[in-house]
Each structure stands twice: as structure tokens, then as C-alpha cells.
Amino acid sequence: MSKLWTMALALIVGAGLLAAPAMAQDSDADSVGSINRGGGEGVNTELGKKGLVIETDGFKLGITTRVQFRLTYQNEVGHGNDGQNGRDFVNFRVRRAKTTLSGYIFEKEFQYKATLSWASGANIIEEAFFRWAILQYINVTAGQTKLPWNWEEITSSGSQQFVDRGYVNEVFNQDFAKGITIDGKVGEDVSWLKYWVGVYNGVTKGEADFRNADQALPSEAFTNRIVDGDMMVNLRLETHPLGDVKYGMNDQRGEDEHGKPIFAIGLGVNWLLGNFNNTNIRPDESGAGATGSGRSRTSHDTLAVTLDGHFRMFGISVDIAVFMRHTEFHNHGRNKYNPTNPTRNGTGNFDDLGFTFDVAYFILPKQLNVGIRWNWLNSDEVWQAGSTSRRFGVRPDANEIGLSVNYYVHGENLKLTFDLLYVSEQLPLAMNADGAGGSQSIQGVYTSPPARSAGSLSASSGAGASDYADTWIIRLQLQWIF
């Protein structure tokens, strides 16, 4: 099997190398034109701005490959009673290597896309879907897609302002999902309304992370937390009243559109329910554990909402988003939950808030830009293990501040990105097996922050002040798309 994948990769990448790099969103990009090769009359092979494109009557195949090579320096600085220090590193890495095959079959309205991620380990299939483009107002997509919930996650990793998406996005985004999506647009010259609505598998990311994560390849047989009854419903609405704003985190429009102000407003609503097994969040009071089928007796339903706005003019871009998430927990059967036995030993719900603010400006149009980022996260603290205050948490509260510089050699197809980040995480007393804290169980984004010890909370008002894990991150990345 490994030889097969190696041969497939070699063939695809070899074909893609025939395409000349060009500016991704530039109508003036260089192109070596079109040539006809073997295959007979009516077969056209185009080398140019969209990689390698093969098209004939009733069939189109486009092949593009995106690679990101990165150098990262990370310096962790802790302060407070239980801070950390010294887990520093410098590292070269191929962050992404993806090949996308897309086009149509039989008729132009029968569209397809498959994205293979060579650097992601076991889950090589990132996207695989079929789309029936019926009308402007209604289209149907079936398969695995990037879930259309929040703007920053929908934006391709190749079109980010920073090397990667922000801290808050990594806490709230809904990743890839398998299911059926209906989408459409209302408006002819202006997109007064774009919508996406769909139903999907509801695969919980982890036993303490109640987001969707359905990128794995489960079989149809029953397996815990994957198939039996878990589900997710998603809705996204957008309006672009002055003209469409392209998915991205800066303004790359040409001189003919440069001075025209445009903006978009989006709303995403996601409801995910599924079973999970974490006795620290919801104890197994009866000792019953899972059902005979192996399914957990504890479930959650999570409602996540995001509201975002995006403005573009004269090379200036502003992107703002607010995130809200409410998670409720339920016990079933013999594992019925009793909040007084033991006292406050289980979580009733989580309420998390987040905010992102990104601004970018092209100093040299379409060639050099700078950007700033601020992310803020308020992660809920909860009762746990009979505690007398809300000292426990799944995630730290966090602030992220960043500066980025992009140099575009050939648009997104060949660019160099530098960014500098400062991340400050406020440490809760983490949940672990005995509820005493002190474990490495808090979920950070760039690190796995340590928990505070119980002593730092009870000694005095001074000692009870929050400890912090502060992280400095410097990244340099080269991206090429062909």
C-alpha cells in the first residue's frame, strides 16, 4: 500500500511541476498559455495560473499542490507559583503538503473535489466531495468538506495573513465534516445573502473538547462516539452588499478595484450532540460505566455561535469575529447524575467566549504587507471534586498578540511570511483522575500548559493570584503552490 501511495504522489507532483507558478488572485499573472498534447481532438492541457488543467468535452481535471516549509522558534516563560520555563525549541518543519484534484464530470454542474494531505499522518483524505450545482439559489454537496461555520477557518491555509490561524480559531473551529450541505445565493450583481445549511456526523474532538472532528475514516460498524446517534447541524449566513469579499485575511484586489470599499457580515450557528466518557466532568455515580454496546452513558449538546465582519479598502483589511459556546451535559440510565453526591463533583455546563481582531495593510500593493492580530479567550472555570469555588478548567484563559509581514513574489503561489506572537495563558487548576490538579491536562493551542497546584489557591490572597504561562513564538515560512 505504501508503494502505491508513493507512486501516486510521484505521478501527481510530477504532473503538477509542469505548471508555472503564478499570482493566485491576479488577472495579470503570467501564463505559458495552452498547448495540445496527445489524447486526440478536443483535449486541452493548460499550463498556467491554476496549476495543471486538463479539459475535454464533459470532463475537467485541475491539479494543484501547496507546500509550506517553516522554521519555528518558541520560548516559554512561566511566572507565578506554578509557572513553567525552559521548554524552548527551534525546529524546521514541512507544515503542509497538499494536492487538490478538482473539476467536473459529464456536465459542468456535476463538480468534484478531493484534497490529499501528505503531511497530516494517517488521515490523508482532507476533502472528498461531490457537488451538484443546480441553480444559483440551491446547490447540494455530499461528502467530506471544510465545515462552513467561521470565516478564518473557511479561509485556506494558503491565504492567511499569519503563518497559521489564531489561538481563538483553534479553540472554536469545527474542522472537517462528513454530511450533506445545501447552499445558495440570493442576488444577481450583489450577493445580498449567501447561505449554507447541512447535517453531518457529530464526532466529538475529545473527552474534554466538545467540537466536531470528523476527519477520520470510520467504518459503518458501531464504534463509540462515532456513528450511533451522534449528529451535528450547521448554518452559516453571509451578506456582501457592496460586492463579494474573497475569503482571505487581507485585501489583494487590483488597481481597478483598489479604492472601492467592500464589506461582509457573517453569522454561524452550530449544534453538536454526542456521547463522551470523562468521569471528571461527569462522574459515573453508579459505577456502571458504559452500556453493553460500549457506548458511554454520558452525553453533551453544544451550541456554538459566531458573528464576524470584514472590511476592505485601499489595501487595508479589518476582520473581527466574536465566538460564544454553551455546552450542557446529560447522564442516562444507571449513570443518572446527582449533583449532591458527591457535592459539586460534576460540571453542569460550560460557557466559553472568544474575540478576534485582525488588521492588515499593503505597504507595496500586492507585494508587501504587514498585519497585527489580537485574540482573547475567556474559558469557563467549573466546580470539581467538591471544591468550594470554580477553580477547575479544561482550557486556560488566553491573550494572543501578533505581528506579521508577507512578501509576495508571485501572489499566494510564492510568498514568504514572517510573524511574531506573544501568548499569555492564565492557568486554572486542571481536571485529572483524582480531581487534585497538578497534571498536564489543560488544552492549550501552542503548548500543553501545566496546572496550578491546589496550594497556590488556598495559601493566601497573594498566593491565590493566577499563575501564567507566557510564550514567545517566531516563525518564518516559505509557501509555494503549483
Image (cartoon, rainbow, N blue to C red):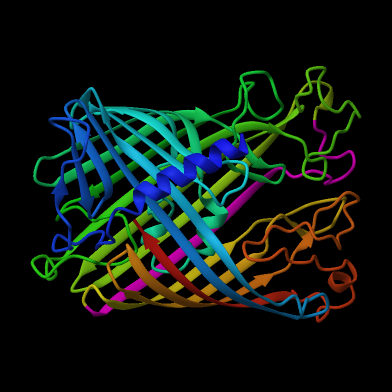
Please say if 377 is above or below 154: below
Residue 226 versus residue 432 in the image, above or below: above
Q: Nearer the viewer, residue 6 or 369?
A: 6
Can you say which quadrant of the picture contains the N terminus? Answer: top right
Q: Is residue 214 visible?
A: no
Can the viewer see residue 275 in this picture?
Answer: yes
- Residue 424: percent from the left, percent from the top? 63, 74
333 part of magenta stretch? no
Query: Which percent across, then down, holds residue 46?
Result: 20, 46
245 or 406: which is nearer to us?
A: 406
Verify whether residue 361 appears in magenta.
yes
The answer to whether residue 400 is left or right of residue 267 is: right
Total numbered labels placed on residues in the image: 0
- Measured along the vertical axis of the image, is residue 51 above or below residue 452? above
Q: Is residue 41 above or below residue 409?
A: above
Residue 56 at what x, y percent from top left?
18, 31
Residue at image position (59%, 39%) is 3
Residue sitting farthest toward the front: 38
430 with respect to 15 (left or right):
right
Position in image of residue 44 (x %, y %):
17, 38
Identify the residue shown where x is 58% and y is 73%: 72
The C terminus: image quadrant:
bottom left
Residue 417 sits in quarter: bottom left
- Range shown magenta: 337-364
Out of 6 and 40, give the one closest to the viewer. Answer: 40
The picture quadrant where one finds residue 155 is bottom left
Q: Is residue 386 left or right of residue 293?
A: right
- Please tell me in which quadrant of the rendered image residue 78 appears: bottom right
Name the one closer to the observer, 364 or 199.
364
Residue at horizontal 71%, vertical 75%?
Answer: 468
